[in-house]
């Protein structure tokens, strides 16, 4: 039994069926069906406006779907939203951190929001994890984009979420910072964490993910296991999916 | 308990952030003091006439400085894209509303605590009266309660600085009118019983303004 088969038989961390999201007349998602086994990593590709960020925001319960059903660890999201938010971590385009507060103060604020017991210990751990110990009392406004992204990751990992949602986490990061970020993500939970991430980097996706989805105009245009794809094959599929819609 | 911990965390975060920048306090205080000084020079009135007009002047300063302050309640969250971070936390949207309202209440009470002595000095009126302080506190609670929800509504519009007073002032006007009337009674040295009706109006609106925004805030903030 290879690792992919083992993951496929694992219980589902995230399951969506018929998720639709519309903004007035504009339909951003048109019936998304996903099954993400616990402990697996799913990469979501798609051109700008395909609905990747909307999907992540809906899974993070920041946005409500217009229709459809979302199960997180077997529980319906809309009925258990506060419970399930504590099971989710989100790294988005923005850091969701306050520039006037220090790194420590920002994490302390979120630790209080998540109701963590031993706040100081856990904040120290995640700051150390993202190698920001030396700057922990500096204000966010003095940090570079890469440092802010590391702090965003620290914020997302603060409450040890079993499911991590990453929305184009590579934005603004160099190769070294990206490697460090994935190293941190993988290191903390010994590979037991479920990760759903949107990306434009095929190489990165194939290196870290189990499954691949290509979104196009709010629909899943392609779905496959990463082990069945190579880089050229994935690029080819992406071009086919996006070109088909353009025609 | 978790609800109130989150509320305290949000309010404390806003206060800490403001203490660092002093954006709200400095601009609002300058504005409020300017209003009092301009009115002081504009009306050169006899002492008995001052008591008739002073409550209105005081509440003009409170109301417009309050609008300035409330305008900033959600703007930092919007500018720093932190509202979604808050919305992703495992707390009800109501906790965000209460936390934001408490933060705004703190700033407004702080500004009022500075304005009142300046008002007393410029108009030569004794302001350390339990009646006036009670009216000010009760009216400020209603003002902030309804202002916070309009601030959340306005923050997603382009002309948010203009939208907030246009939407908010007509709604909050019953509280301001009642506060002006009750303040006048207090400053004129009349008894508590004379202002009962106005206090009752302020209290009734406080209850409405605390309940309705609490219920509708989750819908306001999400779409």
Image (tube, coloured by chain):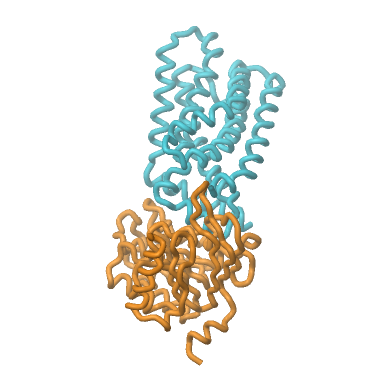
Chain colours: A orange, B cyan
Residue A43 coordinates in the image, percent (x, y) = 43, 71
Q: Nearer the viewer, residue A143 or B113?
A: A143
- Seen in the picture, residue B53 relative to B28 is either above or below; the reply is above
- Quadrant in the picture for residue A197: bottom left
Q: Residue furthest front?
A: A247
Q: Is residue A139 above or below residue B180?
A: below
Residue A199 seen in the current view: yes
Q: Quadrant of residue B179?
A: top right
Q: Nearer the viewer, residue A214 or A198?
A: A214
Q: Residue at x 70, y 19 (%)?
A: B194
Count of numbered circles in the view: 0
Is residue A113 visible in the rendered image? The answer is no
Place of residue A147 in the rendered image (x, y in percent of width and height, measured from the top left): 32, 63
Measuring from the top left, give residue A227's x and y in whole percent: 42, 83
Tell me if B33 is positioned left or right of A16 in this view. left
Residue at 64 percent of width and 44 percent of height: B215
Q: Residue at x 51, y 12 (%)?
A: B50
Residue extending furthest toward the top:
B46
Question: What residue is at 57 percent from the left and 57 percent from the top?
Answer: A65
Please give left or right for residue B142 compared with residue B120 in the image: right
The location of residue B204, given as percent across then percent down, is 69, 31
Position of A120 relative to B126 (above/below): below
Q: Is residue B179 left or right of residue A198?
A: right
Is A21 located above or below residue B176 in the figure?
below
């Amino acid at each position: 039994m290879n690792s992919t088969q083992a993951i496929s038989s694992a219980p589902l961390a995230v399951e969506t069926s018929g998720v639709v999201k519309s903004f007035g007349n504009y339909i951003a998602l048109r019936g998304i069906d996903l099954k993400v086994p616990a402990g697996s990593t799913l990469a979501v590709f798609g051109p700008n406006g395909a609905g990747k960020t909307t999907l992540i925001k809906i899974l993070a319960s920041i946005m409500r779907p217009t229709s459809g059903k979302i199960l997180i660890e077997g529980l319906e999201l809309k009925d258990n939203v506060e419970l399930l938010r504590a099971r989710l971590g989100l790294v988005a385009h923005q850091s969701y951190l306050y520039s006037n507060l220090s790194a420590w103060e920002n994490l302390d604020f979120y630790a209080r929001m998540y109701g963590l017991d031993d706040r100081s210990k856990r904040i120290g751990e995640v700051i150390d994890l993202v190698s920001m110990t030396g700057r922990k009392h500096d204000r966010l406004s003095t940090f570079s984009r890469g440092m802010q992204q590391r702090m965003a990751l620290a914020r997302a990992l603060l409450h040890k979420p079993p499911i991590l949602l990453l929305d184009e986490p590579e934005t603004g990061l160099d190769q070294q910072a990206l490697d460090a970020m994935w190293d941190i993500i993988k290191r903390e939970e010994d590979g037991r964490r479920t990760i759903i991430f949107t990306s434009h980097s095929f190489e990165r996706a194939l290196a870290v993910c189990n499954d691949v989805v290509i979104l196009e105009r709010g629909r899943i245009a392609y779905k496959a296991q990463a082990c069945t794809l190579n880089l050229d094959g994935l690029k080819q599929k992406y071009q086919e999916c996006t070109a088909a819609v353009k025609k | 308990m978790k609800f109130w911990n989150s509320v305290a965390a949000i309010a404390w975060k806003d206060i800490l952030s403001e203490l660092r920048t002093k954006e709200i306090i400095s601009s609002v205080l300058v504005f409020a003091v300017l209003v009092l000084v301009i009115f002081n020079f504009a009306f050169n009135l006899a002492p008995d006439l001052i008591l008739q007009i002073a409550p209105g002047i005081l509440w003009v300063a409170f109301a417009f400085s309050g609008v300035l302050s409330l305008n900033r309640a959600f703007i930092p969250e919007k500018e720093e894209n932190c509202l979604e971070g808050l919305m992703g936390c495992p707390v009800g949207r109501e906790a965000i509303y209460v936390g934001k309202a408490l933060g705004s209440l703190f700033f407004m009470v702080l500004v009022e605590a500075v304005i009142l002595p300046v008002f007393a000095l410029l108009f030569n009126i004794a302001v350390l009266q339990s009646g006036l302080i009670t009216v000010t506190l009760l009216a400020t609670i209603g003002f902030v309660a309804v202002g916070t929800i309009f601030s959340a509504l306005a923050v997603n519009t382009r002309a948010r600085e203009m939208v907030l007073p246009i939407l908010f002032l007509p709604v909050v006007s019953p509280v301001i009118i009642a506060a002006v009337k009750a303040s006048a009674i207090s400053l004129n040295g009349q008894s508590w019983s004379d202002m009962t009706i106005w206090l009752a109006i302020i209290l009734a609106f406080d209850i409405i303004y605390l309940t309705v925004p609490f219920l509708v805030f989750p819908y306001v903030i999400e779409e």
